[in-house]
Image (spheres, helix red, strand yellow):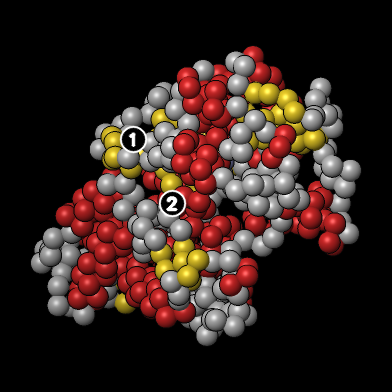
Amino acid sequence: MDHKLTLYNTLSRKKELFEPINPPHVGMYVCGPTVYGDAHLGHARPAITFDLVFRYLRHLGYKVRYVRNITDVGHLENDADEGEDKIAKKARLEQLEPMEVVQYYTDRYHRDMDQLNVLSPSIEPRASGHIIEQIEMIEKIFDSDLAYESEGSVYFDVEKYNKQYHYGKLSGRVLDDLMANTRDLEGQDEKRNPYDFALWKKAQPEHIMRWPSRWSKGFPGWHLECSAMSARYLGERFDIHGGGMDLLFPHHESEIAQSVAANGIDPVKYWLHNNMITINGQKMGKSLGNFITLGEFFSGTHKSLSKAYSPMTIRFFILQAHYRSTLDFSNDALLAAEKGLDRLMKAWATLAKLVPQEKSSVEVNLLRENCFAAMNDDFNSPIVIANLFEGVRIINSVNDKKESLSADDLSQLRDTFNTFIGEILGLKQEETSSGNDASLEGLMNLVLDLRKNAKTAKDFTTADKIRDELTKIGISVKDTKDGATWNLE
Ligand code: ZN
């Protein structure tokens, strides 16, 4: 591949040149949602961040196998080894079968992701569908003597692992500090050390999601599913593992430990983490009352929103910040994003209608190079957007006849906009009142070009047929001395 893509690797704490293990193939694993409630901004950011990575790697010509899991078992309330399973709790409260909860929220998650124009991953495995792989992995960790059984549950022996390897290499945490800071939690007397984490939990009588194993009827620990499923679909060592920064510790740190213990191989070449979203400077949380679901954004029904915001506005808002920066949400910030997006999309539609001139008065090559340079610099979407706005300025001045573009430059600018706005940033025109969007413009340019060719070849039957058929579906075509124009009736 002819590129100089660099990305920031959380593991090495520096930007590295992207060199996949087995080009042109790229394996990418991203931790997906735990499906027990509607998706919110905190779900949208990793989904959009890694959609950008996925889209750009594909644009560069890589064959990407993108795995994003669905956590449907084992994620306990306090993100550790105690408390109720988040899905089982929802099922109990609503008197549903846990898999009904899973199906319902998985469907809603998919609907929200479709609206945000997030591409489907190549594989979307569920934790509950990979219990066998997880049990096999526990056996391999036993073989390495880094797991122990206690009261029907199985724990990972962090201290013993840390003597041979390095627990904390990803998050930078030190085991001694962890030891000093671990709270006393109920049930931890089963563990040799409080920071040991569960690989398998014996199910309490009220716990309905349970599978048989040689230790007990129970369920796998939360960290285990990602280790087992990434190895299953991407191999024991793969290129990219992504997720939100909140998953760095203990989830991703423990994934490394499990994979090294089971397979003897450090599983991931590049670790990528998106930063968090704050709301008016505060952490997002149900108890803080600032927890806004994507559905509430799209309908404008949350009390802190002055209006509804379209999915593309949310997507644009997220892409306006670099994925490793924090992003503060507010109603005003969204209003500004909506205005910016509108300017960009209007210019994109105008671009399709511009008429080429003999000579260019402005340079557009650099714009394209700058967009690629920004993407190659750790997926710097805000710089891409800044360059596209330079393009907007050019488009508007050409439209006002203050500047001009040659046919070659115009076609290059169109290609730059289509590639970066549509294909890589994944933004699309949304319904407007005129209904006259850029894809229709593009389509009509193509149809009228074909009609012109037919006329040039003296094939008037085809030329007339095109005009007549367009009239039937409500598009009138008028021939002028500068060529054909069209209008929606
Ligand atoms: Zn995970």
Count of all numbered marks drawn on residues in the image: 2
Q: Any mark on residue 396, and which?
A: none
User: What residue lies at 52% left-to-right and 85% top-to-bottom?
Assistant: 306
Mark 2, ligand 1, within 8 Å: the answer is no
Q: Residue under circle 1?
A: 12
Q: Position of residue 175 (x, y in %)?
A: 47, 35
User: What residue lies at 29% left-to-right and 58% top-to-bottom?
Assistant: 384
Q: Is residue 356 visible?
A: yes
Residue 323 picture quarter: bottom left
Q: Position of residue 61 (x, y in %)?
A: 38, 36
Q: Nearer the viewer, residue 388 or 139?
A: 139
Position of residue 139 relative to residue 242, above or below, is above
The residue tagged with tag 1: helix, strand or loop?
Answer: loop
User: What residue lies at 82% left-to-right and 39% top-to-bottom?
Assistant: 203
Position of residue 297 relative to residue 421, above or below, is below
Q: Amino acid at mark 2?
A: Asn
Cα distance, mark 1 to mark 2? 16 Å
Q: Nearer the viewer, residue 56 or 38?
A: 38
Q: Position of residue 76 (x, y in %)?
A: 70, 48
Mark 1, ligand 1, within 8 Å: the answer is no
Residue 225 picture quarter: top right
Q: Position of residue 182 (x, y in %)?
A: 56, 45
The picture quadrant for ligand 1 comes to top right
Residue 438 picture quarter: bottom left
Position of residue 361 relative to residue 157, above or below, is below
Q: Amino acid at mark 1?
A: Ser
Position of residue 130 relative to residue 323, above or below, is above
Q: Residue under circle 2?
A: 274
